[in-house]
């Protein structure tokens, strides 16, 4: 009997995508700018941000959206432009743009579809999904508290 999983389960710790010194700098910045986030959670946020970006690089035709916590990691990383560009070039061969969603714009599949598509893309890329950082917001127009997504092109 063969059992097929609906969504592959990732096994790679996405924090391994990030140089340890950079991971520490980004996590420290997150914890400093967001006092409600402790250092262990900040480290997890950086890892899931790396997974989100890597999944987007592997599936460039898909519009993926971060969770509110992963978006904090993405915004923090973008402020470190040299490090962010270097990471993007390494994993995607191009700069991964952060695209704000206009108030009247929705992402394909709506919030639930975008949420599922993003988590499936991360798992399909082989990365562990830290479910606690991807809580589904349900009624929001996107998973990103700033209303943003990756650039699929």
Image: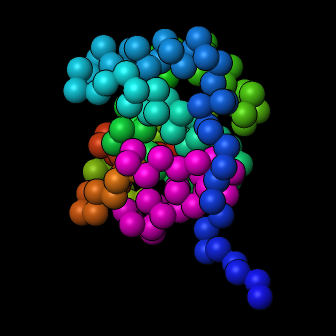
Q: Residue at 57% of width from left, 61% of height from top?
A: 120
Q: In the figure, residue 18 lies in which quadrant?
A: top right
Relative to residue 63, is residue 153 depicted above or below? Answer: above
Relative to residue 146, is residue 26 depicted above or below? Answer: above
The coloring applied to the image is rainbow
- Left or right of residue 146, residue 42 in this image: right
Main SS, magenta region, reads helix
Q: In the figure, residue 38 lies in which quadrant?
A: top left
Residue 80 appears in the rendering: yes
- Left or right of residue 83, residue 92 in this image: right
Q: Residue at 61% of width from left, 74% of height from top?
A: 6
Relative to residue 47, is residue 142 depicted above or below? Answer: below
Q: Residue at 72% of width from left, 27% of height from top?
A: 89
Residue 153 appears in the rendering: no
* Foreground of the two, 105 or 54: 54
Q: In the figure, residue 121 lies in which quadrant?
A: bottom right
- Left or right of residue 39, residue 138 in this image: left
**Image location of residue 70, percent across then percent down:** 42, 38
Check residue 27 for magenta coloring.
no
Q: Which residues are magenta?
A: 108-133
**Image location of residue 37, percent across then percent down:** 29, 27
**Image location of residue 23, percent across then percent down:** 54, 19
Check residue 120 for magenta coloring.
yes
């Amino acid at each position: 009997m063969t059992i097929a999983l609906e969504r592959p389960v990732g096994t790679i710790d996405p924090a391994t995508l990030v140089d340890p010194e950079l991971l520490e700098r980004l996590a420290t910045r997150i914890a400093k700018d967001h006092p409600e986030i402790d250092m262990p959670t900040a480290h997890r946020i950086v890892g899931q941000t790396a997974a989100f970006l890597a999944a987007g690089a592997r599936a460039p035709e898909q519009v993926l959206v971060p969770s509110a916590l992963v978006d904090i990691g993405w915004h923090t990383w973008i402020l470190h432009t040299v490090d962010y560009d270097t990471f993007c070039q390494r994993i995607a061969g191009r700069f991964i743009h952060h695209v704000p969603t206009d108030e009247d714009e929705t992402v394909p599949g709506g919030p639930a579809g975008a949420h599922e598509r993003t988590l499936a893309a991360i798992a399909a890329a082989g990365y562990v999904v830290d479910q606690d950082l991807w809580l589904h917001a349900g009624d929001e127009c996107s998973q990103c508290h700033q209303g943003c997504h990756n650039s699929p092109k």
